[in-house]
Image (cartoon, grey):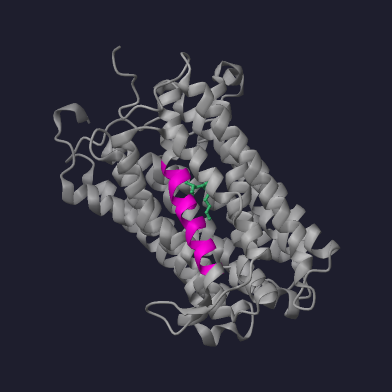
Amino acid sequence: MHTATLPRPTPAWRWAALVLASLAMFGNYYAYDALNPVVDLLREQQGLDYREVGMLSTAYNIAALLVLLTGGWVIDRFGARRAIVAFAAVCVLAAAVTAAAPNFPTLLSGRFLLGLGAEPLIVAVTVVLARWFKGKELSFAFGLNLSISRLGSAATDWSPSFAAPLYSNWHDPLWLATGVMSAGLGAAVLYFALERRAEGRFDLGAAGETDRLDLRGLYRFSPSYWYIVALCVVFYSTVFPFRSFAIDYFQQAHGLSREAAGMLSSLLPVAAIVATPLFGLWVDRVGRRSLFMAIGSLAMLPLFLVVTYLPPGPAVPLPFSEVELPLTLFLAVLVFGGVFSLIPAVMWPAVAYIVEERRLGSAYALMTFCQQIGWAIVPLAVGTLNEHFLAGPENPAGYAPGMWFYTALSALGLVFAWKLWQAERGPGGHGLEYPGGARPPA
Ligand SMILES: C[C@H](NC(=O)[C@@H](N)CCCCN)C(=O)O
């Protein structure tokens, strides 16, 4: 079929494709985060310690590293629409294995399997969005996709409230996650059917470059690229592991109920749902990308120490819920949510200004690869610190070393963002500080 003679897809088809692909991502993010509200139950009922909880997170990353190494081969070989269905099916299987697990090794295999499905599912969805939206609201489509994905994370955090009866044991909330991911698989199948019907009617463009890892070209990336990668590593190595332990931490160290801890933790993705696309639009207008990354890193620096050492403050009612939250924690997590919106909204698109288009797939794949390495190590380190310092409700101070560790990572992030800002203000800058990514003529 000679697609060049066909029209580009109409808005209705494009938005239907976005909604279906994003629902698959909703299931993906829900299934990943489903472990967070059951950490205390895994410790009490399954006898896991914090280090083992950290290992569950690391198992996901090791699988993701292996999949990223084999690159987008499956996507190239079988096409993105088949890949979306296949990877979503792997996620359903992974969620079911995790929910049914009778012991720790099976739990580990479930999370490993999830890494094999979830990260390439994200890549495949990125590929299909690029095909449908290239030249038409692509950034906005990516932003909406990320917001719907984060809604999946928030829904997991809310589940101790809306699915409270399930939380008498750790299996049932994970079966709920399996159900949600199955609905995501349903959306993936509908997407498959939609794309098949669109073929022959519309020009969907050639399948783009998938995120391949081209190790030969690494040395050709500029220092600015490597500063962004370094920031990406320390940023996500802080945020994602913090989220993994956050609900349990708020329960044990601050005495919150699971519902309140879940609501508090959900402020992070909820803030990001609203603010990420807005920050994206703002930065596109004003530029100053590396300055914003530095501001975000600076704002993040004191937050872990604030929740550890400042008095909790008065209890404030959370709108639209029965829950009351200590003011200090509420404000700290809200600011963290702002940072979680600002840095990703600026950081991922900034790479496109620094790396030429034909190497963008490699650049993103390498960045995601490095991200997984940091994200694999930190939960293990924090889990080990919690165990070593006997963290628990009788010894809330035992969580402080982990919080200092996050603070040290945030400080490193600030250094990398600062170096990037310096590099970009100089003559070798790539235009990150200017609205369209180009320095205005002198
Ligand atoms: C855009 C970015 N996504 C990622 O970093 C993914 N590699 C992993 C997401 C896993 C979420 N449970 C993000 O979400 O900010």
Q: Residue at x 67, y 43 (%)?
A: 374
Q: Residue at x 55, y 44 (%)?
A: 298
- Report the predominant secondary structure element of the magenta stretch: helix
Q: Quadrant of residue 429?
A: top left
Q: Quadrant of residue 401?
A: bottom right
Q: Is residue 370 magenta?
A: no
Can the viewer see residue 86 in this picture?
A: no
- From the top left corner, tell me how far across and down residue 216 is, in percent: 60, 19
Q: Is residue 249 left or right of residue 314?
A: right
Q: Is residue 375 above or below residue 309?
A: above
- From the top left corner, tell me how far across and down residue 239 is, in percent: 58, 53
Q: Is residue 45 above or below residue 124?
A: below
Q: Residue at x 55, y 60 (%)?
A: 32
Q: Is residue 19 left or right of residue 201?
A: right
Give the number of callouts. 0
Q: Residue at x 60, y 33 (%)?
A: 416
Q: Is residue 232 above or below residue 322?
A: above
> Which range of residues does the magenta coloring cover?
329-345
Q: Is residue 131 left or right of residue 79?
A: left
Question: 15 and 93: which one is in front?
Answer: 15
